[in-house]
Image (cartoon, coloured by chain):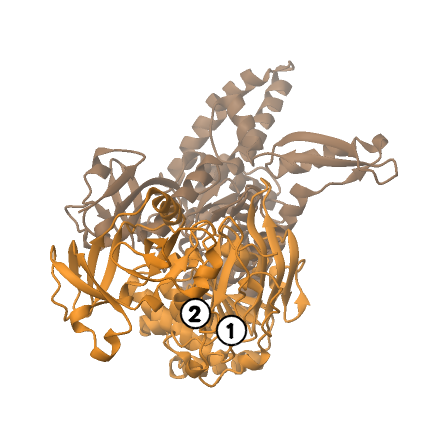
Amino acid sequence: MGLDLRLRDASPGLLALPWLSPLAEWSAPEVPLRELPVGPSRHLVRFVKTDGRLWALKELPPRVAMKEYAALREIEAKSLPAVRPAGLVIQPHEDTAILVTRYLERSWQYRRLLMRISPDRPRHRERLLDAMASLLVDLHRNGVFWGDCSLANTLFSRDGQVLQAWLVDAETSEIHRELTDGQRQLDMDVLVENVAGGLLDLAMGLKHPPEMFDGLIKEAASVATRYEALWDVLHAEPRFSFDDRYQIEGQIRQLHDLGFAVDEVTLQSDGAGDEKLRLKLCVAARRFHATQLRELTGLDVGEGQAKILVADLFAYQGHLKQESKTCIPDSVAAQRWMDEVLRPGMARAHEALGGQGDPVQAYCDLLEVRWLLSEKAGHDVGDSTALESLAERSVPPDSAAQMAVAEAATNQLPALTRELLDQLSAVVDGGDLDLGGLD
Amino acid sequence: MAPITMNHITKVYGDGYPAVNDVSLEIADGEFMILVGPSGCGKSTLLRMIVGLEDISSGDMLIGGERVNEKAPRDRNLSMVFQNYALYPHLTVYENIAFPLRLKGVSDDEIKRRVEEAATTLELTEHLQRKPSQLSGGQRQRVAMGRAIVRQASAFLFDEPLSNLDAKLRGQMRTEILRLQRRLDTTTVYVTHDQTEAMTLGDRVAVMRKGVLQQVASPRELYEQPLNLFVAGFIGSPPMNFLPAAIEDNQVKLPFLSYPLPREVAAQIGDSDLLIAGIRPEHFADSSLVDEHKRDRGTTFEVKVDVTEWLGSQQYAYVPFEAPEEINRHLAELQQELDGEQMRTQMIVSLDPASRIRDGAKAELWLDPSRVHLFDPRTGKNLTRDAKAEAPAATATSSASGSASSAPAPAPASSSAAASSTAPASSAAAPAPASAPASGSAGSAEPPAPDGSLRPT
C-alpha cells in the first residue's frame, strides 16, 4: 500500500484521518464528518471537522489533483480570493487522490442566499453577479484563467454592502504570466453560460414562475457587461495635455472609490505628434480602504467593510473636531472611534442579529439600515430604531443588510412560503426606496 | 463544418522558447485528428491557437478557408466539448441542451428544431422531458454533448477531455465520442497524452515532440511504419523493444540472433557499424507454436527468460540483454523524453497464452527479421521504413463520411516533413473504420535533421 501525504497544517486531527481508505468509505463516528450542502459536482466531496476547523476533501484522479493543488498554491501566493489548499494525499493503490482545502468561514453557496430571498428582488442577484465579475477581473489581472467559472464553483461571503466571491474549484485553472484577450473572453463566455444555467436551475427548483426565466437569462448576460466595465476602468489610458494634469486626481479617486490602490502613475508622450500625454495608472490590489483602516486602527477586514468603517471614522473625527474646536490627529481620532463608536456599536448590532455572522459586518448593517430608514423618514431615526429593525429582521428588502439571512442557521429562519413572499413584496411596495446610489 | 489548415504555425513565448515550431497541418473536413505527445510537446498550445486562446507568433491559421489569426474565440464558430459539462438537476434534458441557445437569442422554434435533431442523433429523444438524475451515466454524457452539437459549430475541439474521469467512465466516453463524431461527421481535433485514446479514436494522429510535428498518419501506419525512433517508442503498449544492432560482414547482429543486412539499409548507412533495432513484442513467438508454413520466413534463437507474466488472454516474457554504452545513452535520453517507466535493457516478448515457456528457463523464440526496424542512432531515422507498405489499399474501406473527397491532396515530395503531407489514411486499426477516409497516405521520405527530430524545411 503506497501513500503520498502532504499537509500544510499537520494538526493531529487531520493526521489521524483514515488516509489509506477511499474517501467514500469513511464513516462517522470514527471520522468527524459534517454534512454540508454542495451543488452538483463531478467528484466526491466530503467535509471533516477537526482541530476546530472545517476541511473540504475532494476525491479526484491524481494527475488532476496535483494540477489543482499547484494552481491553488499559486493563486494563494498571489493573495487572490480563493480557498486555501491545505493538503494533497495520493492513494496509488486506488489510483486516486484527495485534495484538502480549508473551508472558508462564514461563506455560503449562491443557492443559500437566493433560496432565502424573494425572487422579485433582483438587487441581491445583482450583488452576486457584481461579485462574480469582480472576482474574474481580479483573477484575470493576475494571469489566472479559470476555465470553469460558475456560481456553483464559487463561495460568497458578506463584505460591507457588497459580496466577496471566492474561487473554490481550480480543476481547470491555468496560470499564465499574462492572459490573452482570447483567454479572457472564453472565460467570460463560460461564466455567462454557467451563471444562466445556475440561475435557471435554481428558479426551476424553487418552482418560480417561468415568466421570470427570460429576465434571468438577461441578468446572466449582464455579468459580461459588469466585467467589461470594471476591466475598462482599470485599464483605461486616457490622454491629456500637460496643463490638464489636474484630471489625474479624478482618475485616481475613481479607482480608490472602487477599492483599488494605485501603485504608480506614469505620464508619457506617446509619439502621436501632438502635445498630449498618455496616463497609465498601475493598479494594485483591491485593498485601498482596507489598508487605510489597518494603518489607522490595526483592524484587518474586507475592502467592502473597510470602505464603510473608514467613512464612519472620518465622520466621527469631523464631529470631534467640531465639538472641541481643535484639530484632532488621526491616531487620536482612530483610537476614540474604536473605543466610543465601533466596539459598542459592533456589540449591540451583533446582539440584535442574535450573535449570527461577523460582528464587524453587523455594525456595517446597522449603519446601512439606519441610513436607509432615516432617508425614508426624512430625519435621523437613531441607532435604536435601526437595531430594532435588525433584530426583527425587517430591514429594507433591497438593503445589503437583508443578506444576513444567508448567514442565519437554517432553524432560525421561517420557511419561505408564498404568503411570506407576498408579505415581503407588500413591505417593499409600501415605501419608494431608491437605493441606486448605495453600492 | 470546415477543414482546418495550419501553415507554418509557430508559438514563441517571452523567454524565446518555441512551444510550437513551424507546424503545418491540414485537417480535412469531417476528419477526426488526434494531437498526441508527451507533456510539454506543444499539443495543447497548438489546440489553443486553433481556439483563439493563444496568440499565434507566426504562420496562418485557416478555418473553412478563412484566416482566423486575429479572430476572437467566439467568432471562430468552434465548440470546445466538455469544457463545462455541468448538468443542472432541476432542468429537463431539453432545457439542459437548450439554454445556451436562449442566451444567444435564438428563436424558440429554431431551438426546438436543433434540440430535437441533436436528441435524435444522440438517441435521447424519449428522455427530453426527464431530469438528469433519471438518466444513466452514459446518457448524461450525451446530454453534455448535445449542448455542443446545438451550437452548430464548424469543428469540435477536445482538450484531454477524459483526463479527470475514472477509468470506467473514460472507456464509456471514448466510445460515445467516437460514435458521435462518426454520425455527425464534424471536423474534430482531439488532444491527448494517452495513446490508447489516440490509436482508437483518430482517423489520423499527429505525433508531436518538443513543439515539432514528427509524423502524421493513420494509427496503423504510425504503429507499423514509424518515421523515427521517437514515434516508434511513443506508439505502442507495451512499447517497441530497442536492441543494439551491430553491422558486421553484411549481417545485422542482435544480442540473440543475426540476419542479413537488408540492401536498402546498407545503401543508407555508409560506414556506421552500430544501429538500433526496433522490434514489437508481438513479432516474437514461441518457436514451438509457430505454424510450419510460417516458420521458414523467420529465424529461431535461444534466450534465457527472466520472468513471465500470464494474463489469461496474453502472456509476456522478459528477457534481459546487454547493450553498448553508446546505445544505452541514446535509449536513456529517449526514455526520459517519452516519460516512460519501461526499463530498456530487457526485452518484452509477447507470447501466445498457450506457451509453456516459464520463468528462468531457456526458451526457443522465433522472429521474422523482415518485421525488424532499424534506426540510425544519431538521427533517429527509421532506415527500414517501407513507404509503399503504408495504408494498403486492401484495408481501406469505402468511405461513408465523404471526407476522402474533400481531403487535401498528398503534398509534393519537396514539401516539409511528414507534417504537411498525407491525406487521411485508412484507420483500419481503429475499432470503427466504417467511415474512415479511404485515400492513400504518403509520408515524406525526407531525411530527418541530425538532431533526431524531423525539422520542417
Amino acid type, mark 2:
Glu
* Subunit bearing disc 1: B
Q: Does residue B235 show up?
A: no
Find chain A in the image and tell me its colour. Answer: brown
Q: Secondary structure at mark 2?
A: helix
Chain drawn in orange: B
The answer to which quarter of the image holds residue B196 is bottom left
Disc 1 marks which residue?
A: B441
The answer to which quarter of the image holds residue B73 is bottom right
Same chain check for tags 1 and 2:
yes
Q: Residue furthest right?
A: A274
Quadrant in which the C terminus of chain A is drawn: top right
Mark seen at residue B247? none
Q: Is residue A158 left or right of residue A258?
A: left
Q: Residue at x 20, y 64 (%)?
A: B365
Q: Which of the two labelled residues, at mark 1 and mark 2, occupies the earlier sequence position? A: 2
Q: Is residue A232 left or right of residue A24?
A: right
Between B273 and B238, which is closer to the camera in this rendering?
Answer: B273
Q: Does residue A72 show up?
A: yes
Q: Residue at x 59, y 42 (%)?
A: B16
Disc 2 marks which residue?
A: B221
Residue B250 x, y percent position in the rendering: 38, 59
Residue B399 x, y percent position in the rendering: 49, 84
Q: Is residue B454 left or right of residue A17?
A: right
Residue A208 in the image: above or below residue B39: below
| Circles 1 and 2: CB atoms closer than 8 Å | yes
Residue A343 in the image: above or below residue B193: above
* Subunit bearing disc 2: B
